[in-house]
Image: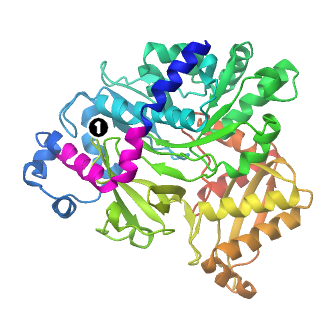
């Protein structure tokens, strides 16, 4: 196995030179991909509609093709679900990544072409390993197996030739045979729909394996880890898997979970690597082991544009190209892809932390913020405040959501939070004060509204009983997969729903 590990590590590191090229020549690479995408799609229905054959510059493209979202592309995608081809992309589309992002009842079906599978998602997965092997040349990852917390897979009944599942399921179903050999548990368990049964089966199936890496969302990884420790009677994961060296995570901010992982995996040598892989594409990889920023991957068949946060609500917002962005400003990402998404706003917001090379951090969602009083609190603000409050009070958070308290009877408004702890704060009131104080320090709009409680009062925080969010997701039939608790909302739908459920259990 050591020889195999050395060969794999050598192969993975060969890609580093190409990554360095797009870091050095970002505009050339993006320009090349822009023309590649336009030329490829000129004879599709979409390409003919916007006359792609006569588009010669990015400026013409921006003038001619409006900004899209899922609702505007939905009629085209529904036809593709029914088996029509050459609509948004020339190659046959047989796979769709089912995505909801939050607990929204409406599912999205994102087309996944052969090109986006190979040149984007799989390339991103391989690059992640290349970067890890480059940063840790003495790694032994390929001497064991990777534990992957996959999603669920279903066959689309509308058309025998079309399949859908959440992104991880689509990737697992299309992996090459050699990759399957290095993965655990087997596909039958990895793609189970029932997440409660699945966690038990995964724990039972993996405790005897030599697991060297884990990939998955932090919340579900913790659930699985606790089941593994319960089954084995061990006190931490290194007693079960002594060769565990890498944890790959994404989808949610890792900061609130970091302390729990230190307890589950008590080793200073454990390597944590964040990726930014959505149903729509693979966008970023944490390429430095001493920084949580992610390198924006520029050669995955994606052409990027960025809309400043203040322009998101405009009817036809101006989008900036890569060379026009600034540091530490919030932008909504707009992508054109080799899966047939054109000027598509995916709903995530990011900030650039470096412009040479282009590195980013995810700051939230275009719809997930609280701005009922002009305070513009985004998820990044919330995560920073919660992390500080946890540190100050020894707390560990499992899940949370927050929304506005509206003006009523002449009283000021405020923010209402529901927080479920894995470890309770030693002083709950201090937790709230530190969270509030931190929000004021990092967000001047929030601070001005909090001045003398004139527009915003001190946050109201509910200490939720154990399993509150799990039970709520279960009641909505939203356990597992891509479903996440909406962290922040500008209205009270989620808050009121969860508070009602909590009250009914008292």
What residue is at 67 percent from the left and 59 percent from the top? 383
**The N terminus lies in quadrant:** top right
Q: Main secondary structure of the magenta part?
A: helix
> Which residue occupies the foreground of this view, 457 or 344?
344
Which residues fall within the magenta stretch? Answer: 17-38
What residue is at 66 percent from the left and 62 percent from the top? 382
Left or right of 317? Residue 346 is: right
Rendering quarter of residue 150: top right
Is residue 26 on the magenta stretch? yes
Rendering quarter of residue 143: top right
Q: Is residue 490 visible?
A: no
Is residue 18 on the magenta stretch? yes
> Which residue occupies the foreground of this view, 206 or 293?
293
Question: Which residue corresponds to mark 1?
Answer: 78
Left or right of 15? Residue 79 is: left
Q: Position of residue 506 (x, y in %)?
A: 84, 48
- Residue 503, compared with residue 435, is above or below; it is above
What residue is at 7 percent from the left and 53 percent from the top? 54
> Which residue occupies the foreground of this view, 96 or 359?
359
At label 1, counting other C-alpha atoms closer than 10 Å, the crowd grade (few under 14, some 14-19, many 20 or more) is few
Left or right of 476? Residue 344 is: left
Q: Is residue 444 visible?
A: yes
- Residue 274, compared with residue 220, is above or below; it is below
SS class of the residue under badge 1? Answer: helix
Rendering quarter of residue 337: top left
Q: Position of residue 134 (x, y in %)?
A: 54, 36
Q: How many marks?
A: 1
Q: Position of residue 448 (x, y in %)?
A: 65, 84
Query: Residue pushed farthest right?
Result: 426
Q: Position of residue 237 (x, y in %)?
A: 79, 27
> Which residue occupies the foreground of this view, 176 or 290?
290
What residue is at 14 percent from the left and 39 percent from the top? 44
């Amino acid at each position: 196995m050591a020889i195999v590990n050395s060969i794999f590590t050598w192969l993975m590191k060969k890609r580093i030179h190409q990554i360095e090229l797009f870091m050095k020549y970002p505009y050339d690479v993006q320009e090349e991909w822009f023309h590649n995408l336009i030329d490829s799609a000129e004879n599709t229905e979409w390409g003919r509609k916007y006359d792609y054959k006569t588009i010669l510059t990015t400026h013409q493209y921006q003038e001619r093709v409006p900004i899209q979202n899922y609702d505007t592309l939905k009629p085209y995608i529904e036809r593709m679900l029914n088996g029509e081809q050459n609509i948004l992309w020339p190659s046959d589309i047989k796979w769709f990544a089912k995505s909801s992002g939050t607990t929204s009842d409406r599912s999205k079906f994102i087309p996944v072409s052969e090109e986006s599978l190979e040149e984007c998602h799989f390339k991103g997965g391989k690059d992640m390993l290349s970067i890890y092997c480059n940063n840790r040349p003495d790694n032994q990852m390929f001497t064991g197996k990777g534990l992957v917390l996959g999603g669920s897979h279903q066959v689309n009944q509308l058309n025998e030739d079309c399949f859908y599942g959440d992104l991880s399921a689509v990737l697992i179903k299309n992996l090459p045979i050699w990759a399957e050999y290095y993965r655990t548990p087997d596909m039958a368990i990895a793609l189970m729909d029932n997440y409660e049964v699945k966690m038990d089966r995964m724990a039972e199936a993996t405790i005897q394996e030599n697991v060297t890496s884990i990939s998955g969302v932090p919340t579900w990884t913790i659930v699985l880890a606790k089941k593994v420790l319960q089954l084995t009677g061990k006190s931490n994961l290194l007693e079960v898997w002594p060769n565990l060296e890498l944890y790959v995570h994404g989808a949610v901010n890792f900061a609130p979970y970091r302390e729990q992982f230190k307890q589950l995996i008590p080793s200073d040598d454990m390597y944590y690597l964040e990726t930014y892989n959505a149903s729509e594409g693979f966008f970023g990889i944490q390429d430095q082991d001493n920084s949580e920023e992610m390198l924006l991957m520029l050669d995955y068949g994606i052409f990027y544009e960025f809309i400043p946060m203040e322009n998101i609500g405009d009817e036809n917002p101006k989008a900036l190209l890569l060379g026009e962005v600034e540091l530490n400003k919030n932008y909504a990402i707009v992508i054109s892809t080799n899966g047939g998404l054109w000027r598509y706003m995916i709903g995530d917001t990011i900030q650039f932390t470096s412009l040479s090379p282009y590195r980013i951090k995810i700051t939230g969602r275009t719809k997930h913020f609280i701005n009922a009083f002009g305070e513009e609190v985004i998820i990044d603000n919330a995560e920073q405040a919660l992390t500080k409050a946890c540190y100050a009070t020894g707390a560990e958070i499992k899940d949370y959501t927050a929304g506005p308290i509206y003006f009523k009877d002449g009283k000021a408004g405020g923010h209402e939070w529901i927080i479920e702890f894995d470890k309770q704060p030693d002083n709950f009131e201090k937790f709230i004060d530190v969270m509030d104080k931190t929000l004021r320090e990092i967000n001047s709009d929030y601070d001005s509204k909090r001045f003398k409680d004139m527009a915003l009062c001190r946050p109201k925080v509910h200490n939720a009983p154990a399993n509150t969010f799990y039970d709520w997701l279960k009641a909505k039939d939203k356990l597992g997969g891509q479903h996440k608790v909406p962290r922040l909302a500008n209205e009270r739908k989620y808050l009121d729903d969860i508070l009602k459920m909590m009250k009914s259990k008292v």
